[in-house]
Amino acid sequence: MGRDRSGRSAIALRRCDTLGVVNTPRTLYDKVWDSHVVSHDEGAPPVLYIDLHLVHEVTSPQAFQGLRDRGIGVRRPDRTMATMDHSIPTRDQTLPILDPIAAKQVEQLRINCREFDIPLADVGDESQGIVHVIGPELGLTRPGITVVCGDSHTSTHGAFGALAFGIGTTEVEHVLATQCLLQHRSKTCEVRFHGRPRQGIVAKDLILALIAEIGIGGGTGFVFEYTGAAIRSLSMEGRMTVCNMSIEGGARAGMVAPDDGTYQYLAGRPASPRGAAWEEALEQWRALPSDDGAAYDRTVTIDAAELEPMITWGTNPGMGVGLNQPVPEPNGNASVRKALDYMQLEAGRPLAGQPVDVVFVGSCTNSRISDLRAAAELMKGRKVNPRVRMLVVPGSEKVRSQAESEGLAEVFRQAGADWREAGCSMCIAMNGDQLSSGQYCVSTSNRNFEGRQGKGGRTFLASPLTAAASAIEGAVADPRRYL
Amino acid sequence: MQAVTSFRGKAVALPVSDIDTDQIIPARFLKTIEKLGLGENLFNDWRYLPDGSRNPDFVLNRPAAAGASVLLAGDNFGCGSSREHAPWALIGYGFRAVISTSFADIFRNNSLKNGLLPVIVDQATLTELQEAAQSEAGLEVTIDLASQELELPTGRRVRFPIDGFSRQCLLEGGDQLSYIQQRMGSILAYERSASSELDTRLVSRASA
């Protein structure tokens, strides 16, 4: 599990300024953490201020009920933003929701937002979408802030140099009521991707390679900071893909230091600062990157130049290999044996060539415009293999309309894929978009747990490029032959 | 929340590593707006066969497991999503503690806030307990939160780590939200000093 290669000592790195005051170099995490501690009493965790609270329909109803039971309101509706994504259908969203339990949950969010005066990106609004897609898209996510949501993939927002992590419903209630959380400081782990990835190797391959290396519990207790040339060269959307899956390595959060690419992405977004406020913000953001010599509790290094397209073969995101590499033998490992039994796969053979029934492009990991562009470019003029059902689900209403205006939706339709409306869809299979028992699916989502995409369904996690190539071939395929 | 102090309960072994929250409570059961009623679907896809009948091979369906309140699970229990429905389902079923070698962060936090004890022991102790539970139906252990001790059937006492503040809250039935609310003066002072013009209402105006 993980390796400590830093070998650095925090004490050795301390330096004195001219006044003789000890200035310890700080990491990005240290800086964001330090600037958000409201108070810290002996014997209790620090009280941490939360700048932005994102809310969705699944993990919030019991928290709002808790406020009612206590007779209190939402303290900062202006720092709270709600949307619907998990339970909503992705086929014609103008129709009523057929599942009465899902319909009630969605309606409950509307009631809660009205009652507590919280801005809501409702179904049909142009700002609606998967919570981790719309936060950045709207300019709400920004460097140096703290972001929480009752959703483990809140780590996504760390791509902007924010400290962003998932919380439970009790904590959602705490933040609604006070805009604060009781939180222990995490340890820091630098995840350095050096080298230049080869053509066809994308953000998803980087993060799947990391989790395969450290295991799904490898980051427990840590916040990751992703560094290195391969991270710097990623687009903001690529960085979001990487940070999104930090939780799959056990880390609460993952962060990338902001740079010019971050500022370009944010400039002019609906909620981004403007004018003098923008200049002031830029000055603060530029001070955020980790100081030279800042010490991490641990460092993991991965050579991005050595990677090939990654895919998972098992029932957790750490069970991944290069798609041309053999699936491991159990060799007495009960978890591997159990996973292979569930997946009905033979050890010792690569997954390339393994027939698939469904291909899903979507989720908070890979449903942004660049993901859809990559998949569409590969599929242009080609057809989805007749044995495959392909579902392409944009991450937000804005991504949907952009993909339609760029002609991407038409490429998918022409190829025979099912083009949908925005939502979490088959990543979590709460809305009727799901696998049948026994089906194999190449999915751009983030979890391949047993039954995650439908009871008995079998998931191979991979990049949008690998998903598109596999849809064409009807089997797990190396996308590089199409590039 | 009711205070948690010391209790004795029947232990059942589920010696599987990395049991994720989708196994504890599959996502399709998260459409409820309540906390109650989730126990029926705890470990749903392992516990029930496709026709809806109970899977006789699953440990919780064995007659000897009836009334169990302590789960002996494998390493990294509760990994995956932030759903608090996972501890709600375990508590709804009747569990009061889970013993493992490690827990995922969010699951552990959620459990502590609901009075479900995440008890961390070393691998040898866990293996000893799991083997004992598998060979002796009705095996009981005692968990004492005040002394942070787990008493094995052999009489051996093992100390387990737990966050001191959470422990105090559990022992007193204290409420963490009240604790934060009592610091409202500091929160207001923080808000006055930290400048940020972030405003979510700008978004709804922009898209209205």
Image (cartoon, coloured by chain):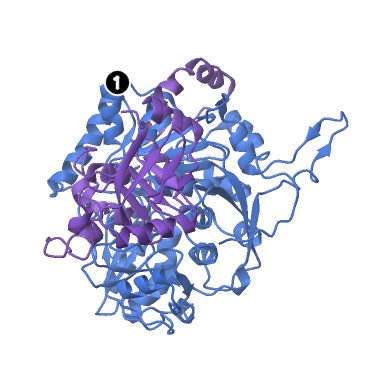
Horizontal side of A242 relative to A286 (left or right) equals left
Q: A371 or A18: nearer the eye?
A: A18
Q: Which chain is purple?
A: B
Seen as rendered, the residue at the extreme front is B155
- Residue B41 in the figure: left or right of residue A441: left
Q: Position of residue A313 (x, y in %)?
A: 40, 73
Residue A94 visible at all:
yes
| Secondary structure under the numbered disc 1 in the rendered image | helix
Residue in front for this viewpoint, B10 or B87:
B10
Q: Residues within 10 Å of mark 1 (few under 14, many from 20)?
A: few
What colour has chain A? blue
Q: Position of residue A2 (x, y in %)?
A: 58, 61
Q: Position of residue B178 (x, y in %)?
A: 40, 21
Mark 1: which amino acid?
Arg
Residue on which disc 1 sits: A70
Is residue B106 shown above or below B126?
above
The part of the image, by quadrant, that contains residue A380 is: bottom left
